[in-house]
Image (cartoon, rainbow, N blue to C red):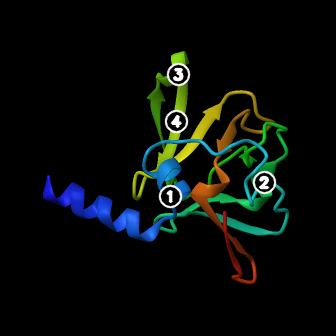
């Protein structure tokens, strides 16, 4: 139990209140408010908590849903899945395989070639451009 509390204290000190609510408590940011929603530069998206690489920028698309959307995760496989039955719905939650941070959900209504739509909270990611500039969501 001590380890969990120690780790929780580390996240509280590292993350803003909103980042903590989304990343560590599986919250959701309001649609169309995320800093990374309209990001179009070339680069990759990293986990806000541990900086594991998650999504390449060339798989991002405008799904019109209000959150950054991707049709494929990076080949590293740092995104994992679990069933989410909250809010009276049956969904698939996505989270960082490295640190367990909540990212969002994946839906089977994305574009080819995968047909997947990874709907991700902007606040749960950091964007790293090809010239190594980082923007926190």
Mark 2 or mark 4: name the one nearer the start of the chain: 2
Residue shown at the point (39%, 63%) measured from the top left: 12
Observer able to see residue 71: yes
Mark 2 or mark 3: name the one nearer the start of the chain: 2
Label 2 vs label 4, nearer the camera: 2
Mark 1 or mark 3: name the one nearer the start of the chain: 1
Distance from the alpha carbon under mark 4 to that under mark 1: 21 Å
For residue 93, which numbered disc appears in the image? 4
For residue 17, which numbered disc appears in the image? 1
Q: Secondary structure at mark 4?
A: strand
Residue shown at the point (43%, 51%) measured from the top left: 24
State whether residue 111 is above or below residue 6.
above
For residue 37, which numbered disc appears in the image? 2
Q: Secondary structure at mark 3?
A: helix
For residue 87, which numbered disc appears in the image? 3
Q: Disc 1, disc 3: CB below 8 Å?
A: no
Front residue of 55 and 25: 25
Distance from the alpha carbon under mark 2 to that under mark 3: 24 Å
Splitting the image into 4 quarters, where does residue 126 fall? bottom right
């Amino acid at each position: 139990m001590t380890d969990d509390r120690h780790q929780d204290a580390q996240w509280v000190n590292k993350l803003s209140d909103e980042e903590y609510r989304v990343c560590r408590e599986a919250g959701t940011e309001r649609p169309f408010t995320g800093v990374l929603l309209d990001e179009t530069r070339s680069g990759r998206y990293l986990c806000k908590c541990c900086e594991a690489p998650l999504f390449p920028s060339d798989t991002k698309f405008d799904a019109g849903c209000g959150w950054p959307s991707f049709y494929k995760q990076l080949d590293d496989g740092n995104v994992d899945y679990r069933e989410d039955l909250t809010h009276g719905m049956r969904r698939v939650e996505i989270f960082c395989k490295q640190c367990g941070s909540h990212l969002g959900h994946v839906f089977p209504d994305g574009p080819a070639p995968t047909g997947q739509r990874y709907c991700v909270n902007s606040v749960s990611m950091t964007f790293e451009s090809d010239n190594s500039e980082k923007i926190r969501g």
